[in-house]
Amino acid sequence: MMPDRVTSNIATERIRILFKLAEENITSHPTRSKRYIDLIRKIASRNRIHIPKELKRRICRGCKNLLTPSNSHIRIRHTREPHVAITCHNCGHVSRIPLRRR
């Protein structure tokens, strides 16, 4: 059974609220922030919706922590295909986002 529009709108709104709370608590309560990210992932999977792309890119795929300037670094790479490389300082995972020329 596919989720209806009202349910998915409520779930997306909750995801955005939890993400905002995770951002606010990342420095003072990192475990609480990690819990908010876990809840975001659980809400998205239970309601069968995607986490919005702008939020999903700020979650490490290795350790599932919130990526901030204090716990990650971002580089633009030009080798092979140009891309943005985001490295997590917690687990060392590197996320690559291709830069497509138009």
Image (spheres, rainbow, N blue to C red):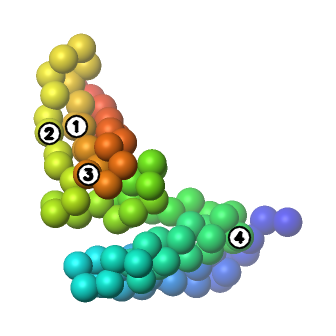
Of mark 1 and mark 4, the one earlier in the sequence is 4
Secondary-structure class at tag 3: loop
For residue 53, side relative to residue 46 (left or right): left
Does the residue at mark 2 contact the one at mark 1 (Cβ under 8 Å)? Answer: yes
Point 29% across, 60% down: residue = 67
Q: Determine if residue 94 is in view.
A: yes
The crowd level at tag 3 (other Cα within 10 Å; few <14, some 14-19, many 20+) is some
Mark 2, residues whose alpha carbon is within 10 Å: few (<14), some, or many (≥20)?
few
First of labels 4, 3 by sequence position: 4
Q: Is residue 99 left or right of residue 3?
A: left
Q: Which marked residue is nearer to the observer: mark 3 or mark 2?
A: 3
- Between the residue at mark 1 and the residue at mark 4, the CA separation in whole angstroms equals 31 Å
- Amino acid carrying label 3: it is His
Q: Which residue is mark 4?
A: 46
Q: Amino acid at mark 1?
A: Val
Task: Name the quadrant of the N terminus.
Answer: bottom right
* Residue 58 % position (x, y): 33, 59
Q: Which residue is mark 2?
A: 75
Residue 72 appears left or right of 53: left
Q: Which mark is residue 89?
A: 3
Q: Are marks 4 and 3 in contact (CB under 8 Å)?
A: no
Number of other residues with Cα within 10 Å of mark 4, as a class: few under 14, some 14 to 19, many 20 or more: few
In the rendered image, which quarter is residue 94 located in?
top left
Tell which residue pokes out farthest to the top in this image.
Answer: 80
The CA distance from mark 4 to mark 3 is 30 Å
The front one of 91 and 2 is: 91
Q: Quadrant of residue 3?
A: bottom right
Disc on the earlier residue, 4 or 2 = 4
Residue 63's place in the image compared with 45, above or below, is: above
